[in-house]
Image (cartoon, helix red, strand yellow):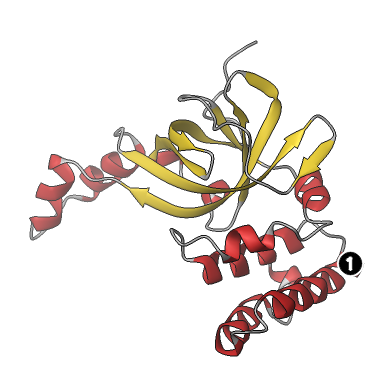
Amino acid sequence: MAAADLSSANMVGRVLRASTRGFTCGTQSNKVGDRHDFGAFVSAPIANDDSVQVVGLIYAVEIKDDMLVSELVMAEAVNSSILRDQRENRMVPLEISVLSIGYLYRQTIVHSLPPRPPMTLSPVELCTTEVVYAFTQRLDFLPLALNASEVPSDDLLGAAIRYAARAYPENEEYGFLVRCGREIARLLSHDLKRLEHVLALIRPLNGARNNR
């Protein structure tokens, strides 16, 4: 099988380190784009089994520095050509952290942690609209995001729900948001302050679909 191309439209990066709870992948900072957005749904094959794909949410994106960057930020003035070269040509690493929220086994969707993490250098790709739509038909992934202590869970959940809503036809989008709101209200019925915050994050914006 041919190696996945980092320049392909859905390629996010390659796995650097991983556990069943999540993984970190890397790519070049000059490749950053909307496929690296906070809350995006991504997938990667688990170790030694391409038939099982971990599904996760991007919860952190970090552009690393190096000695040259450290020197440039201290300079009083930087030539525009140097800045352009730094941003477009140099191999500055970008690290993307992902929270596992389920996995795909052939045609079956499981909303639980995967049996194994991905292997180092496995390709990480953006989930297709069809996968996001199918994965979010059931909302069993919401507790995994809400209860993840190592991530900004409330903001991540809000971003993920808004991201997933874009996978729905226009006549289904509002219904999906309402379903999510009701499930979150059930899960957070003991914490009204947090519930109010999360519901505010997923409230649809007027004209949001037309502005995409």
| Identity of the residue drawn at 52% across and 60% down | 148
Q: Is residue 134 visible?
A: yes
Q: Position of residue 159 (x, y in %)?
A: 60, 65
Q: Position of residue 131 (x, y in %)?
A: 78, 44
Q: Quadrant of the N terminus?
A: top right
Q: Position of residue 101 (x, y in %)?
A: 63, 50
How many numbered dots are placed on residues in this image? 1
Secondary structure found at label 1: helix
| Identity of the residue drawn at 68% across and 65% down | 161
Relative to residue 125, is residue 193 depicted above or below?
Answer: below
Instruction: Name the residue furthest top.
Output: 1
Q: Position of residue 48 (x, y in %)?
A: 60, 18
For mark 1, what is the residue? 172
Residue 172: name its quadrant: bottom right
Q: Nearer the viewer, residue 47 or 40?
A: 47
Q: Nearer the viewer, residue 33 or 61?
A: 61
Relative to residue 128, is residue 158 depicted above or below?
Answer: below
Q: Nearer the viewer, residue 16 or 65?
A: 16
